[in-house]
Amino acid sequence: MNRLLFVLTIIAVAWTCSCSGGSSTVVPPPPATGFNNGSLKGAYVFSMTGTTIDNGTSSFSRVGVFIADGGGGIAATGGVEDIQIFGGHNIFNLTGGSYVVNSDGRGTLSLTDSIGTVQYSIALVSSTGGYLVDMISGDTETASGSFSLQTSTTMATGTYAFDFSGIVPDNTGNPISIVGDIIPNAAGAGSFSGGSFWDVNDAGALSGKTSISGGAYATDNANPGTGRGLANIGGLDFVYYVIDSRHVEFMGIDTDTAAPGTILGEATAQLAGTPNDVSSFSNSSFVFVMGGSNVTDGGPHTRAARLTATGGALSAILLDDNNEGSVTSVPPSGVLNAGTVTLDGDGSGRGTFTFTQNASNTFTFIFYLSSATEGVIQDVSSVTNGGLTTTIEVADGTLLAQTGAPFSSSSLATNYAFNWSGVSTSQEDFVGQFAPAHVSPNGQVDFNEFGQGLLFFNNPLNGVITVGGDGTGSTGQHSTFVAGISGTPSTTINYFAYIANSNTILVMGTQNSGKRIIAGVLTAQTP
Amino acid sequence: MKLKIRLFLGSAVLASALLSVSFAGAQQQQAAVAQANATYDASRETTLVGKVLSYTAESSVPPMGAHVIIQTAYGPVDVHIGSAKLLEQNHFTLAAGDSVRITGEVISIGQSNTFAARIIENGTQSVTVRNSKGQILQMPAVHAPRGAR
């Protein structure tokens, strides 16, 4: 027996030596998943939001459409983009560009307009879309977002749930979150019907449910075939791009030079069967992640949670909070089993989640559903101190039903593309891909740390998802995601993972050192 | 007379608040919860005067961002500055031994209470790091990514 162990040890040592190759480190190539340049073909609507410095600092957004030829080229005509920057609105025709899609779905994209070329790092989820990060060289700028295959160019009728967020365009510089529903009364052009509402959180001042019927929208006939249009919603001006029969991307274009801001978001048409009464909820579990800033001093703030709705009652509530580096779980252990869920029942998809931790802390969230499994959500929670009740933060995000539970490591997808966005010394954005079951490192990541020389490409990544319990969090047991980034620079980012289903995992950074507030999403790849 | 009383009360409140944010310990932390404000109000601002003990651009102590610890007549005080990039862009430096005046207020953020700086003066240099509403300048919000299709 000892002789056998000795032989095995010799074999193991010999194998290790043969693999180590002297002093250099052999990094296994990232797993191929079957993507190539042909995976990106057609018109894609893209959107992103970020921060830039150019004789001042400004948040900014881009939204537009590019046309990929399936062979690495971007069409010289037919593409267009709108940019809201330094409080002003600009529109540019895209005049060309190029791209490369690697076998793992990661790649590069360059889009050229009359000002110049912007480089992006991309990660495809499928041929219908993916994530991107602004990796422009020579500028201090970062942004991240997504792109989606365009299959329609006309806004259809229906009830759309939307979530717009950013800096309110009224020269105050206030952070703002707007969630609501709009009901276009005709395809292509018209106004918004009665039953259109929004809820605004403007630096902690809450509008309550407010009618926004009226307004206007119309396809832009000066840029035919692009899906571009202009809209006025609740008195705010927007440019929009139609993605498909259910999805429209919006960007605010009001002038706001005193405190440059931008608002960006998406509207999603309701599907048949969208719950209209709480009786639709029967042991219905949801997860959400949201990002924004606190009301106290504008510092970055994220929240993620899971809860179960049955009728008008909430149970199995677990919420994680990262307020400017202070990380807490509510409750500290286990789950809360008391709370309420409401639905307005007017077809808007609007409802609320409410629960309390103690006499001082009331957690309230407003949501608008676009289906039984998807919606947008806004935080309107408050804290009472010395008799004064104050809204805690301005934040919003994605609400997803938890389906396919229980989860385990074997039920995870083979490959995930991801986008994380956060704040360290300033905004930072990450895009990449990994295969959970692959040997370490199991993927690669590109990231932008907002500064000259702070663009990083192809850093090895080891992404480890650990499923806690049945993966739902319903007993208070967290699932986690650890992103070990090696190369230069190297860092480890720890997340709580909220599993919506095996294809979509929402993540919220848990770094208690106070040096990074971050949130993101992992999405299964299907070449 | 009213002015003197107001100054006395102001000093007492400031001293109490500073002690609360300066020293760890359950009792002090509890006291600070009651004294710190959930929102910034420029009318409550006070001014700290002291020497820099240390400066860090990325503190491991919440709230995130740049912090400076200064030695005051009340003891050492941890002051939250916010964006280190803002100081860099203004070529504003803080080093141990520098004599500084810091205008701000004690506020409550998450589980922590902190003296939030709005204006920092170092010799002839001055930099504003928060606006009058207490919001950190050049500190972006987190944009939670949406899932791609």
Image (cartoon, coloured by chain):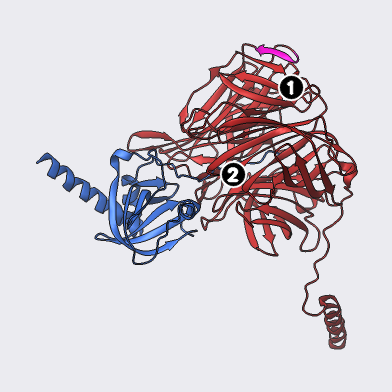
Chain colours: A red, B blue
Numbered tag placed on residue A393 in the rendering: none
Q: Residue furthest left?
A: B1
Q: Is residue A409 magenta?
A: no
Q: How many marks?
A: 2
Name the image quarter holding residue A283.
Answer: top right
Q: Which residues are magenta?
A: A187-192
Q: Position of residue A153 (x, y in %)?
A: 79, 23
Q: Position of residue A298 (x, y in %)?
A: 47, 42
Asked if residue A17 is positioned above or below residue A108 in the image, the reply reads: below
Q: Main secondary structure of the magenta part?
A: strand
Query: Which residue occupies the foreground of this view, B76 or B125?
Result: B125
Query: In the displayed structure, does residue A465 sit left or right of residue A36?
Result: left
User: Residue drawn at (57%, 39%), measured in percent from left and top?
Assistant: A59
Helix, strand or loop for disc 1: loop
User: Residue drawn at (59%, 43%), measured in percent from left and top?
Assistant: A51
Q: Residues within 10 Å of mark 2 (few under 14, many from 20)?
A: many
Q: Which residue does the numbered mark 2 point to in the structure image?
A: A52
Type of amino acid under label 1: Gly
Circle 1 marks a residue in which chain? A
Type of amino acid under label 2: Thr
Q: Position of residue A505 (x, y in %)?
A: 70, 45
Q: Which residue does the numbered mark 1 point to in the structure image?
A: A273
Circle 2 marks a residue in which chain? A
Query: Which residue occupies the foreground of this view, A172 or B10?
Result: A172
